[in-house]
Image (cartoon, grey):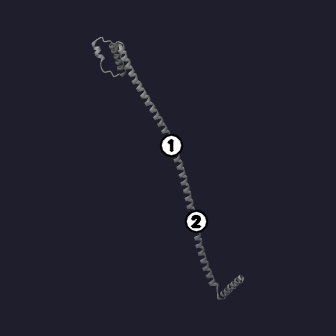
Amino acid sequence: MRSISNIASFSSPWVLAAGFGSNTNILEINLINLILVLGILFYFGKGVCASRILINLLENRKRTILGTISDAEECYKEATERLKQARTRLQQAKTKADEIRVNGLMQMEKEKGDLIDAANEDSKRLEDSKNFTIRFEERRAIEQVRQQVSRLASERALESLNSRLDSELHLRMIDYHIGLLRAIENTAD
């Protein structure tokens, strides 16, 4: 930053010409402008008028700065409030997401248990059906075997009777059975 003595000393016209140009440092430009304005005011105003204008300028500048600060503070308060609300909504969303996740896991476990129970019931029903079918087929097979055994026994007994049975034995058998029937008839009365 240039010192005030460099700006104020004009030893040659070339220095004055070299002092003007484009300066991009905003703080240095404001300081130079302020010094120039103050110098011009004191030179031309010589007293009260210049100081009154300077005071008005400074008060306007002060009001502008305070207004800007007040606006910035208001924006900061609003942004802070919105941030607080956003954090609250985020926390609520996290809580809701946790509830949904827990409910989902519980529902999944319940449905898993229901599916296992249903599968066990189906398996039991299939086992019962299989056992019933096996018992039915066993009975049917046993009945068929009985019928075949009975038929074979009847055929053999008939063959045996036919081979042994002569007319005398045949008559004795008839008499025996008639006697049995009479005995049964007498006991029934």
Question: What residue would you read off at disc 1?
Answer: 96
Task: Indicate the position of residue 126 as horizontal and vertical percent values.
Answer: 55, 61
Distance in Å between CA atoms under marks 1 and 2: 52 Å
Q: Please report the residue visible at 56 percent of the width from the left and 58 percent of the height from the top.
A: 121
Q: Is residue 152 left or right of residue 178?
A: left
Task: Say which amino acid is labelled 2.
Answer: Phe
Residue 73 quadrant: top left
Task: Indicate the position of residue 76 as horizontal and vertical percent values.
Answer: 44, 30
Task: Indicate the position of residue 149 as horizontal and vertical percent values.
Answer: 60, 75
Q: Is residue 84 above or below residue 130?
A: above
Of the 4 image quadrants, the one containing the C terminus is bottom right
Residue 132's label in the rendered image is 2
Task: Say which amino acid is labelled 1.
Answer: Lys
Label 2 residue SS? helix
Residue 170 quadrant: bottom right
In the image, 54 versus 109, the foreground residue is: 54
The total of numbered circles placed on residues is: 2
